[in-house]
Image (spheres, grey):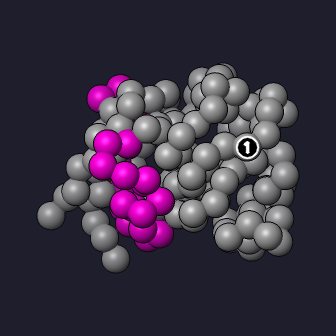
Amino acid sequence: MPITLKCHKGIGPAVTGTALVAQDNFSARYDLDRLKGVFSRPAHKLYGQSYLDRILVVVTAKGGVASAWMLREMTARGMAPKAIVFDRANTILAQGAAFADLTMVDRFEGGDPTTLIRTGDEVRIEPDKGLVTILNRD
């Protein structure tokens, strides 16, 4: 049975994909190998895992303007996640997601999405409605 989570209205097109979840933060600049499509910072909880074609679910964004323009560059090269789900996004990453036409949502009712969504869940994000639906759970 699907589980529907309400969040703040987000950015980007509706997408469906498999979740990759970590109770960690996110920086496109410092956490990723943007050429290989994997988390490359050894201290990150997703170290060594690919974010390609996944819906990335993390606590918050870190970093500044460089992370924002990197989202655009990653999307242009087909090396970005399908979407990013934050507990709380910062305005710089929101601007970066809009510039990249990358789906992004945050501010969930009922809790932190890193505890509500699990790695491997099939998730549908509808940013214009402020909805994230867990379609299938492993």
Question: Could you tell me residue 27's position as x and y percent?
Answer: 75, 47
Question: Could you tell me residue 65's position as x and y percent?
Answer: 81, 28
Residue at x 43%, y 53% (from the top left corner):
112
Residue at x 37%, y 52% (from the top left corner):
111
Residue at x 23%, y 49% (from the top left corner):
4
Residue at x 69%, y 51% (from the top left corner):
26
Q: Nearer the viewer, residue 31 or 50?
A: 31
Q: Characterize the local packing of mark 1: few (<14), some (14-19) or many (20 or more) Cα atoms within 10 angstroms.
A: some
* Residue 46 falls left or right of residue 2: right
Q: Nearer the viewer, residue 79 or 6?
A: 6
Q: Is residue 82 visible?
A: no
Secondary structure under tag 1 reads loop
* Amino acid on which the number 1 mark rests in the picture: Lys
| 49 w.r.t. 106: above or below | below
Q: Which residue is mark 1?
A: 62
Is residue 137 part of the magenta span, yes or no? Answer: no
Q: Which residues are magenta?
A: 108-129
